[in-house]
Image (cartoon, rainbow, N blue to C red):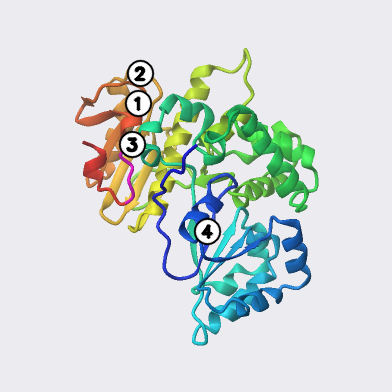
Amino acid sequence: METIGRFFKPPKDSFFLFGPRGTGKSTWLKTNAPDALWADLLDPDSYRAYVSRPEQLRALVDGRPGVSQVVIDEIQKVPALLDVVHQLIEEKSRRPLQFILTGSSSRKLRRAGVDLLAGRVLLKTLHPFLAAELGSRFNLDQSLRLGTLPLVLAAAGPEETLKSYIALYLREEVQAEGLVRNVGSFSRFLEAMSFSHASLLNTAEVARECQVGRKTVEGFVEVLEDLLLGFRLQVFTRKAKRHLVQHPKFYYMDAGIFQTLRPKGPLDASAETAGAALEGLVAQQLRAWIAYGQKDRRLNFWRTKSGVEVDFVVYGQDTFLAVEVKSSRRVSSKDVRPLKAFLEDYPQARACLLYGGRERLRLDGIPCLPCGEFLARLIPDAPVSDLLK
């Protein structure tokens, strides 16, 4: 698969570049920082050298006086390197350096004190492909089935690659790093959480399904977030006029990951899976769109205690947009009722419904757009008016 340009724009200062494995961090760096000094902590020899003597990084930097960029790949493998990086950044008057610190897990870094570099190193994220990055290569049905991870889309056998991807995380990130005590329970938890994808997260129900304690499940969810494999979406409560739920919603970070973990059989309705996959894909695309933009935007959802729900609310600089997602190919006035309820409380907002059909419609004043067309317009910092054309 040919190299596809990314919307991610690096800052001029040093930065962490977080992202799940397979999102293309190394590929992006080799294209955009070809002359940088590299420390690859996935390489066994390099790992052993740095874990035993972190100060070797200083000697390596001093030995390359012409280098202005330093890349440390998978920095979470040797958190002690953060102390050396901190010292070298503080000595910028002697020699200005840009450090790019990549990672696929923030857990060990947070425990080791990432706050040490707060204000000196920015936090950035790289996500699976945006539809707009793929351009004409984007296929909605394929994205719902396989997701948009660069590693998977470039593979000769994407389905097998997805299965191996989960096994890789279990083996190399969860088991090897000792993140959980019982890998078997965590493996069952991954499957059980597929039923919470695009739904309100009820840890008590997940605990009963996995036959473990509720606190264990809460810890497992934190591990998923630290490994960047999943995320929670909080309810939008700004100037709330109704009683709202308190539980967040949960999403796996990629539709292909969700599809791989979700059991399929006679008792599993395809319509239910399709709806959750589409909503998760939109969530992932909106998160990446926000992350790559320069404007301050936040992603939430809205749900009243009576059950009226709007899937996504994007709020921030010059943006207030409510988005409802339906996988069906036909929609009616009933489908836009939650958006109308939201607009009653927030008349300043704009709203749209995304659905699986091909025609642009307008129901009760609400634009209803083909989901694929909307996603193709998600270019960072694009005004809402462009998205709703």
Q: What residue type is labelled 2?
A: Arg
Which residue carries the number 1 mark?
355
Out of 11 and 344, give the one closest to the viewer.
11
Q: Is residue 165 left or right of residue 388?
A: right
Q: Which amino acid does label 3 sit on?
A: Ala
First in sequence, mark 4 or 2: give its number. 4
Secondary structure mostly seen in the magenta stretch: loop
Q: Tell me the element at label 2.
A: loop
Asked whether the beta carbons under mark 1 and mark 4 sit within 8 Å of each other, the answer is no
Q: Label 1, label 4: how many angstroms apart (C-alpha)?
A: 33 Å
Which residue carries the number 2 mark?
329
Above or below, 355 relative to 96: above
Which region of the structure is painted magenta? 375-380
Asked whether the beta carbons under mark 1 and mark 2 sit within 8 Å of each other, the answer is yes
Above or below, 276 relative to 225: above
Where is residue 250 drawn, in percent x and y?
54, 40
Verify whether residue 348 appears in magenta: no
Q: In this view, does 226 lie to the left or right of 139?
A: right
Q: Tell me the element at label 4.
A: strand
Q: What residue type is labelled 4?
A: Leu
Instruction: Give neighbour class at mark 3: few <14, some 14-19, many 20+ (Cα, 10 Å).
Output: some
Q: Nearer the viewer, mark 1 or mark 4?
A: 4
Q: Is residue 223 left or right of residue 377?
A: right
Q: Label 3, label 4: how many angstroms apart (C-alpha)?
A: 25 Å
Q: Which mark is on residue 376?
A: 3
Asked whether the beta carbons under mark 3 and mark 2 sit within 8 Å of each other, the answer is no
